[in-house]
Image: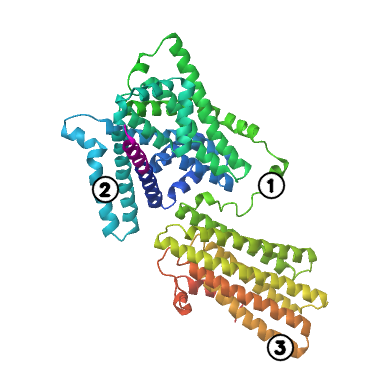
Amino acid sequence: MDIFSVFTLFGGLALFLYGMDLMGKGLESASGGKLEKILEKLTSNVFKAVLLGAAVTAVIQSSSATTVMVVGFVNSGIMTLSRAIGIIMGANIGTTVTSWILSLTGIESGNFFIQLVKPSSFSPIVAVIGMVLLMFSKKEKHHNIGNIMVGFAVLMFGMDTMSGAVKPLADVPEFTNILLMFSNPILGVLAGTILTAVIQSSSASVGILQALCMTGSVTYGTAIPIIMGQNIGTCITAILSAIGANRNAKRAASIHLMFNMIATCIFLIVFYTINAFSPFAFLEEYASPLGIAVIHSLFNVTATIILLPFNRMFEKLAYLVIRETEEEKAHSAKALDILDERFLETTGYALRQGKAAVKRMFEETRNSYIMASGLAQGYDEAIVTQVRESENTVDEYENQICNYLLHISREQMKVEESQLLSVLLHTVSDIETISDNTCGIALAYKNMNNKAASFSKSASEELSVAQQVVLELMNSTIHMFSSRRIHEVLAYSQIIGELIAEIKEGHVERLKKGECSIDSGFVLTDVINSYEKIADRCRRIANYLSQAGEKDLEIHDHEELLSLTGYQELYESCKEKYHLN
């Protein structure tokens, strides 16, 4: 084996890794973030979680990617540590699918149909179909399928390239002597761990081992410890992902490592103890790609079955390794912990998290509005302070969400995803303006208190009605994040406009009669102007949210929106409810 064979080997490895990455990203894009949503929701018991972890990992071809998702879910508070354990265990089973696909490269037969099953036979056709979809189709779905097909073909070509590059090693005595070293279980485990940790993919390291098996120089005695080590080495990705995360996320990563280490130790102790008394003859036989796939699957499935009943023990071990601090016990989850950078590569799911964060920002603003409006019934300086603090919180939310959305924008997105991102950026800006107006209401009441002014009875009643309608308007706008019932927002918006017009007319009449002071009049004007601005921003937000997922984003003509089904009915009902003329 000369230097050019080494170059070929590394070139094959590069193609293998690139193909796996391309195929995995294509599958994730095709899912539109649905895989993460499934992981997030359907983990009600540990058995379901194991099956889900296995299924998702089998689809995206990477246990590392699944465990990184889980670390992100735990870090963001979406998933509890206990629910994460089953998915982590299942990920180990799902990753064995790759080894079974790669084992097909070792098929030897002159039969046409059996030869057709070999990936080297059909992957060129898959590549051609994939390229046709990428080059001639404009649909995003077809592009994702094309990426999956081309990724698979590149992966298989890389596998064949590696196999061809290492074939000459069968005639090199030094190589055989090196492999004999790995027959020592400890050295074999260490070698598998280091190799997998370096390339951060157990699927890839198993593929390399399967390629080496095709030289006819690797025995099962050498391969088994390396496979054990590969399971430990794959934990490095989750561990790196947990750096900078909260302590619970670190526990999730530590469970992945502990599970694989304990499983490996149990297997090695039991297997080699039996071997010492009753030697396994097959250990001296040369391994095949199919044999590697069988051992890889057998180990992971057996380990999961044996250790699954002890899932609670792993949670306790994680808390022993990473102890709970007093600060952690007192900590309540931050509203925007859901904006975890681990989700950024999957734009569909990252955008869903961004949308959820924007909704929480609006809910914080709505709660602040309720506090500010309550000052009309009785002034309290502590409430004003809380409203100001809430405004600062909303400002912080704006910074966090905008930064997160800008990070998403650097990733490759579908047209609809790009449009949703624009909707969210517009919405964040409008919510921040609503928060400013809410703070303005609180400050108006503070000003009235400082001047010892007060509203007349009729002014208080009118403001109370308007205040309730604005709250209904804000609630309806928040509902727009999960539905498209824009007619509710439009109806309340129209009502608040008419109420404000009536309040202004009533205020002029009261001034003429001397029932209202100039100072209270200024406060009244400030408050209703804030209501008007809030209504305008709510209408804009609802308008944008109603178009989420569409390709074009525009402010629709108001008259056009008023013709929506259900608008007129609700509008008439509200007019009657709030006693409008």
Magenta segment, prevailing SS (helix, strand or loop): helix
Q: Which residue is mark 1?
A: 331
Q: Secondary structure at mark 1?
A: loop
Q: Are marks 2 and 3 in contact (CB under 8 Å)?
A: no
Question: Which one is earlier in the sequence, the residue at label 1 or at label 2?
Answer: 2
Residue 509 image label: 3
Q: Is 196 within the magenta?
A: no
**380 in relation to 452, above or below:** above
Picture quadrant of residue 532:
bottom right
- Give how far across and how far down residue 352 sits, in percent: 49, 56
Task: Report, in whole angstroms, how far the alpha carbon at label 2 lies from the one at label 3.
Answer: 79 Å
- Give how far across and how far down residue 540 sits, in percent: 53, 72
Residue located farthest toward the top when viewing the structure as drawn: 277
Left or right, 391 with reference to 224: right
**Quarter of the rendering occupied by the N terminus:** top left
- Give how far across and how far down residue 554 sits, in percent: 45, 73
Check disc 3: other Cα within 10 Å, few if <14, some if 14-19, many if 20+: few
Chain part drawn in magenta: 1-14
Is label 1 or label 3 in front? 1
Residue located farthest toward the front when viewing the structure as drawn: 2
Q: Which residue is mark 2?
A: 127
Q: Amino acid at mark 2?
A: Ala
User: What residue do we see at 19% from left, 29% from top?
Assistant: 109
Question: Which one is earlier in the sequence, the residue at label 2 or at label 3?
Answer: 2
Q: Nearer the viewer, residue 51 or 216?
A: 216
User: What residue do we see at 70% from left, 40% from top?
Assistant: 325
